[in-house]
Image (cartoon, grey):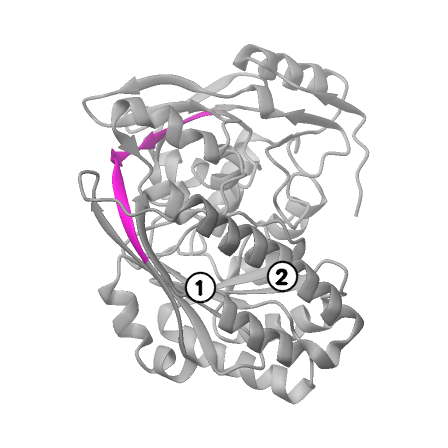
Amino acid sequence: MSIRPQRIEFPRTVGAVRRAVQSAAARGLRVKAVGSGHSFTAIAAAPGVLLDLTDLSGIVDVDRERSRVRLLAGTRLHRIPSLLAPYGLAMQNLGDIDRQSISGAISTGTHGTGARFGGIATQIVGATLVTADGELLAIDEDESADLLPAVALGLGALGVLVDVTIQCVPAFVLHALERPEALTDVLESLDDRVEASDHFEFYWFPHTDRAMTKTNTRLPESAPRHPLSPVGKWVDDTLVGSGLHQVACSVARMLPATVPTINGTSVRVWGDREFTDLSHRVFATSRTVRFREMEYALPAEKVRPAFDALRALIDERGWRISFPIEVRFAAADKLWMSTAHGRKTGYIAVHRYWREDPSEYFEAVEEIMVAHGGRPHWGKMHTLDATALRERYPHFGDFVGLRDRLDPNRMFQNAYLERVLGE
């Protein structure tokens, strides 16, 4: 879909955001803030006024004693490590892509992997929101603390985030072990691997019997580092991970029968490396091949049966799927609209090359995920509406009630939010 906003603004200050919201209200226009535009859904679509927060970036202040850093909402994730470095701090966990803004990442439920670690929004201990009347609403442990579980992952429905406070941790390094393994071995030992590792995930290329596993172990910042060489990193991530994968996807689209061979080759040339580096350099990787994605959060114990059903589905339908399926994990949390709310969670993500129609594949996968208690990632493709989602979130009614109170005239509503939250 495409949206042509009536007005686009680039506020550089919190005051400018307030004025933009007040001006839009006076003209009867709706307002949406946008981060980096990474979401696959229309969660930030703005037919009225679009606020691009790119220029609302950087550190506001640092609480050295409590290791807390307050950042302006438009700050990109990939910039945060350098901002935290002078203070010897890091974010506790990150996803595998770092191009998003901090506000966009938390508002859509962006997460990494690790059974003892929550999504990025769980690291938020304070926030400031511009509400529908253009006023500031500060939320932290001392002020409106009861709202934090809603505002930290607010879907953009409660107002415009202008700053967030992150609970950081001392800087650390990660020892990364990436290797291909027999898929059967990975699945049979999956629970043990997840529990024994700080951060574990695996990718499976359909039509193969191999899995690409990633196991990251947290070490103190003082630990010896053995980073990838610049040449080795370029070969793995740019030449193979992006360049050759782009070629493979293009060939597979034109000649679907070649997909099993291409995927088998990909398993042989990807991964199989070991290195140690600063945490953010290990968590995030470069992704340049365009794709569409659906991801569902499942109770951790349902990951294996859902994954097995997905494998069987691909075989039964005779599809040729060139993109790998990704499986990750996260700790339970208490955020009202978090996909990991109240339960240990596993994530299964499916992708399709952007020039291929994902509809049939994604619809069938969604049926499996819904049947296993899945909750869709807010920033990735899905078809569920408020009726279906209400029963999957214990605090759904509380969140909608807060939305009704903070935004009674639906200043921050759009078609996507109307679908998933109701009118």
In the image, taking residue 355 as reference, residue 52 lies left or right, namely: left
Our reading of the magenta stretch's main secondary structure is strand
The disc labelled 2 sits on which kind of residue?
Answer: His
Res 395 label: none
In the image, taking residue 262 as reference, residue 145 lies left or right, namely: left
CA separation in Å, label 1 and label 2: 13 Å
Compared with 39, 16 (above or below) is above
Q: Where is residue 285 in the image (x, y as percent from the top left)?
A: 48, 48
* Residue nearest the observer in this picture, 118 or 87: 87
Compared with 176, 127 (above or below) is above
The disc labelled 1 sits on which kind of residue?
Answer: Gly
Q: Residue at x 62, y 61 (%)?
A: 245
Between disc 1 and disc 2, whose residue precedes?
Answer: 2
Q: Give the quarter of the figure containing the C terminus.
A: top right
Q: Which residue is drawn at 53% across and 16% down?
A: 135
Crowdedness near tag 1: few (<14), some (14–19) or many (≥20) residues, C-alpha within 10 Å: some
Q: Give the range drawn in magenta.
A: 163-176
Q: Where is residue 26 in the image (x, y as percent from the top left)?
A: 73, 16
* Residue nearest the observer in this picture, 194 or 32: 194
Q: What element carries label 2?
A: helix
Crowdedness near tag 2: few (<14), some (14–19) or many (≥20) residues, C-alpha within 10 Å: many
Q: What element carries label 1?
A: loop
Res 245 label: 2
Residue at mark 1: 271
Q: Which residue is drawn at 65% across and 50% down?
A: 40
